[in-house]
Image (cartoon, grey):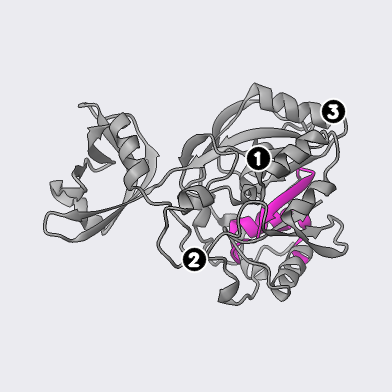
């Protein structure tokens, strides 16, 4: 099998990159048959007809934090602080975060940055803020901006705080949305539950590594996959295992749900509850232990995400589906349309 990354590229016009959301339940979904059969474009609300009583839909309940903060040096220079992970409070009980700072020199050698009236300093390992954790969370909700992906070429709006959040969001910690879940509206979920489809939840806090490029090399298997924290509760593991035992299908919503389930699945095709860190890298040749169907967005060319989809659906099928989506002017990437491989 060829492991050359250039074989997982596709051409698309820039205007197909969705810059705005169509709204939950208002996107389009490309229905793909797992065996590579006919393709069909559906309204997202129409996909409810494709699921059966006894199926289990697995979603990621992470919540996106407004991770981008903009401040100034005492000389007026602009600074961006991109929050990555909340850490234990500092010795004086003030908030402390792992973060990226641009420009990096803004917090070098004891320099300070001001965001509104909040003072920020670096201890070399993290950024310290001059208020307590509780105060910082309130401040973040007010002052933080949604960390939209780099291919969305506009400033974040107040409306993005709800648009870029899935209806399943519960636990804060992600810096990117598990965007496949954005296709679901509350009414779609109610309709599915009423016909006997069950929902199970995992938590995976999506990190900035999801946007990392794979280095161009002859063999993409050499890529070191980013690590992310996950959790699967006993209750949700039982829902998934019961579905499997009764012959229902496990439908993963998004690459994050897929990665968690394939991390915690055992050799018998059942999942074990637990939490930890996963750096699973799924690419063609991977043997799926539990995933029966996949709902996902269209992904950036030559990314780890398109490799995962190709592992499930096949390289040729995947690239054919992407070509069909482009020809039919479907919207691409985070705020765009999706594909359902059943």
Residue indicated by mark 1: 59
Say above or below: 161 vs 265: below
Say which residue appears at 73% left-offset and 68% top-offset: 319
Mark 2 packing: few (<14 Cα in 10 Å), some, or many (20+)?
few
SS under mark 2 = loop
**Which comes sooner in the sequence, label 1 or label 3?**
1
Q: Which comes sooner in the sequence, label 2 or label 3?
A: 2
Mark positioned earlier in the residue sequence (2 or 1): 1
Q: Quick check: is 314 in the magenta stretch?
A: yes
Q: How many angstroms separate mark 2 from mark 3 (CA)?
A: 42 Å
Q: State how far apart marks 2 and 1 are (Cα).
A: 24 Å
Q: Which residue is mark 3?
A: 245
Magenta stretch, residue numbers:
288-316
188 or 104, which lies in front?
188
At 75% from the left edge and 54% from the top edge, which residue is drawn?
340
Q: CA distance from mark 1 to mark 3?
A: 19 Å
């Amino acid at each position: 099998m060829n492991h050359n990354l250039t074989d997982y590229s596709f051409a698309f016009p820039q205007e197909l990159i969705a810059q705005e959301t169509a709204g939950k339940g208002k996107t389009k979904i490309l229905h793909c048959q797992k065996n590579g059969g006919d393709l069909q474009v559906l309204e997202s609300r129409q996909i409810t007809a494709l699921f059966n009583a006894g199926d289990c839909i697995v979603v990621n309940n992470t919540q996106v934090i407004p991770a981008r903060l903009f401040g100034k040096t005492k000389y007026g220079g602009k600074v961006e602080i991109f929050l990555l992970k909340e850490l234990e409070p500092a010795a004086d009980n003030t908030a402390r975060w792992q973060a990226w700072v641009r420009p990096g020199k803004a917090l070098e050698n004891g320099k300070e940055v001001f965001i509104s009236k909040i003072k920020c300093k670096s201890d070399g390992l993290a950024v310290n803020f001059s208020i307590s954790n509780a105060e910082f969370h309130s401040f973040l909700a007010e002052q933080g901006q949604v960390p939209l992906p780099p291919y969305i070429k506009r400033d974040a709006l107040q409306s993005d705080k709800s648009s870029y959040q899935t209806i399943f969001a519960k636990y804060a910690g992600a810096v990117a949305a598990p965007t496949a879940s954005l296709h679901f509206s509350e009414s779609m979920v109610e309709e599915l539950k009423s016909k006997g489809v069950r929902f199970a939840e995992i938590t995976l806090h999506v990190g900035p590594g999801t946007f990392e490029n794979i280095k161009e090399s002859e063999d993409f298997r050499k890529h070191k996959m980013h690590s992310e924290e996950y959790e699967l509760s006993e209750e949700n593991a039982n829902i998934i295992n019961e579905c499997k035992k009764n012959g229902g299908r496990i439908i993963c919503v998004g690459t994050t749900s897929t990665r968690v389930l394939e991390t915690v699945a055992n050799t018998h095709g059942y999942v074990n509850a637990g939490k930890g860190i996963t750096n699973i890298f799924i690419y063609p040749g991977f043997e799926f232990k539990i995933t029966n169907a996949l709902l996902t967005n269209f992904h950036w060319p030559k990314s780890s995400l398109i490799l995962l989809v190709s592992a499930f659906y096949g390289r040729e099928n995947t690239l054919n589906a992407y070509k069909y989506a482009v020809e039919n002017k479907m919207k691409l990437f985070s705020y765009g349309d999706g594909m359902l491989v059943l």
